[in-house]
Image: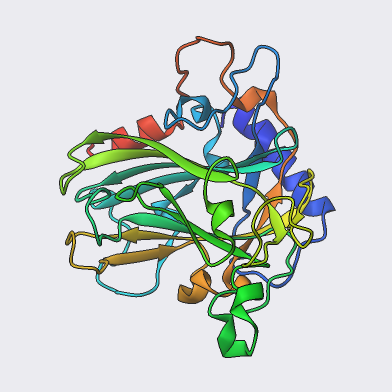
């Protein structure tokens, strides 16, 4: 284990030991953590949302979520994770400087249809920053709640939609919060993006809301409550990696969740608990123009081992 990985693991263990965790969320079989990203730190490259994920290269694997950590809950057709079919590296980050939650994904897919209409190649991310979300935070009329007020208000559901003009989509909630500067998606792709094999490099960002009334019209709305993130906090994060091997047929072949609960898309109780970690400059890329430094446990090395 590298020194950076060891120090980071100890920091993670300390935070998890000293913070009282929520008992509402799933997958206590492993630790989940969002690393604090560098913004304005001398000698360290800022994390920037531009589809270039090289700033994340030195983040140790203890903070990754890969295909090995995910549970397929719908189709039952893809069995155990097969990196020749779908290979994932996902990291969450946050910053007290920007008060933004960040998401990074590197995805190898043997059939990727991200720019074709009616496809399901995406990652759906659900967020509950203060654990205020009820079991139902979408389709709230089924719980006799007014959707004009409560649909996506206490927890939010986002995904990237590369075939649409706005590459970020917010389900429910106020439409203004699903566009820049409050949220967004920037990406790049290597390979055949229209149905072939390739690798997606995705970065997304999210404004933390404790209350986002559906009918609100802007950040200054009197009922909108923005959450202020702090190191040591525990928040709810759920996500589903959707794998579509059939293109524009409007279906998916794999629905891989981090919590093991299919209903993650509308239930706050189906998320997992993420700790917001303090800053550790040893896990970030130094300098302004320094080339990527790849550790022995890096994603690049692990991907290379798939073919060995």
Give residue 48's quadrant in the image: top right
Closer to the camera, 241 or 13? Answer: 241
- The quadrant of the picture occupied by the N terminus is top right
Against 54, residue 148 (above or below) is: below
The image position of residue 122, as x and y in percent, is 36, 55
Q: Is residue 13 left or right of residue 252?
A: right
**Residue visible at 69% across and 56% down in the picture:** 209
Furthest residue to the front?
A: 217
| Residue visible at 79% across and 53% down in the picture | 17
Q: Quadrant of residue 304?
A: top left
Q: Please give left or right for residue 114 compared with residue 202 in the image.
A: left
Number of marks present in the image shown: 0
Say whether residue 136 is visible. no
Percent coordinates x, y for residue 83 in the rendering? 29, 49
Residue in the image at 59% along x and 15% along y: 286
**Position of 37 compared to 250: left or right?**
right
Camera-nearest residue between 242 and 61: 242
**Figure coloring:** rainbow
Q: Residue at x 64, y 57 (%)?
A: 217
Across and down, in percent, residue 87 comes to 33, 48
State which quarter of the image contains the C terminus: top left
Dividing the picture into quadrants, the one containing residue 71 is bottom left
Expressed as whole percent of the image width and height from the top left, the position of residue 231 reads: 78, 43
Residue 231 in sight in this render:
yes
Q: Looking at the image, is 252 positioned above or below residue 96?
A: below
User: 75 above or below 305?
Assistant: below
């Amino acid at each position: 284990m590298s020194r950076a990985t060891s120090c980071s693991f100890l920091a993670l263990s300390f935070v998890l030991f000293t913070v009282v965790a929520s008992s509402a969320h799933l997958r206590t079989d492993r630790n989940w953590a969002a690393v604090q990203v560098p913004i304005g730190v001398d000698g360290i490259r800022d994390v920037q949302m531009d589809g270039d994920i090289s700033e994340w290269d030195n983040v140790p694997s203890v903070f990754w979520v890969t295909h090995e950590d995910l549970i397929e809950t719908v189709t039952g057709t893809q069995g155990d994770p097969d990196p020749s079919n779908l290979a994932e590296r996902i990291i969450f980050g946050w910053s007290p400087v920007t008060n933004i939650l960040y998401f990074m994904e590197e995805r190898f897919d043997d059939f990727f249809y991200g720019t074709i209409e009616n496809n399901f190649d995406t990652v759906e991310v659900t967020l509950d920053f203060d654990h205020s979300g009820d079991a139902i935070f979408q389709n709230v009329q089924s719980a006799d709640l007014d959707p004009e007020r409560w649909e996506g208000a206490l927890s939010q559901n986002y995904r990237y939609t590369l075939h649409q003009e706005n590459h970020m989509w917010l389900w429910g909630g106020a439409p203004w919060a699903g566009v820049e500067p409050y949220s967004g998606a920037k990406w790049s792709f290597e390979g055949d993006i229209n149905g072939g094999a390739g690798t997606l490099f995705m970065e997304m960002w999210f404004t933390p809301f404790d209350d986002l009334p559906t009918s609100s019209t802007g950040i200054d709305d009197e009922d909108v409550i923005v959450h202020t993130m702090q190191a040591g906090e525990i928040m709810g994060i759920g996500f589903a990696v959707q794998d579509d091997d059939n293109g524009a047929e409007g279906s998916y072949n794999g629905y891989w969740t981090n919590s093991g609960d299919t209903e993650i898309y509308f239930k706050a109780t189906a998320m997992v608990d993420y700790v917001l970690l303090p800053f550790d400059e040893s896990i970030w890329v130094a300098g302004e123009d320094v080339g990527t430094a790849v550790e022995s446990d890096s994603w690049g090395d692990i991907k290379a081992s798939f073919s060995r």
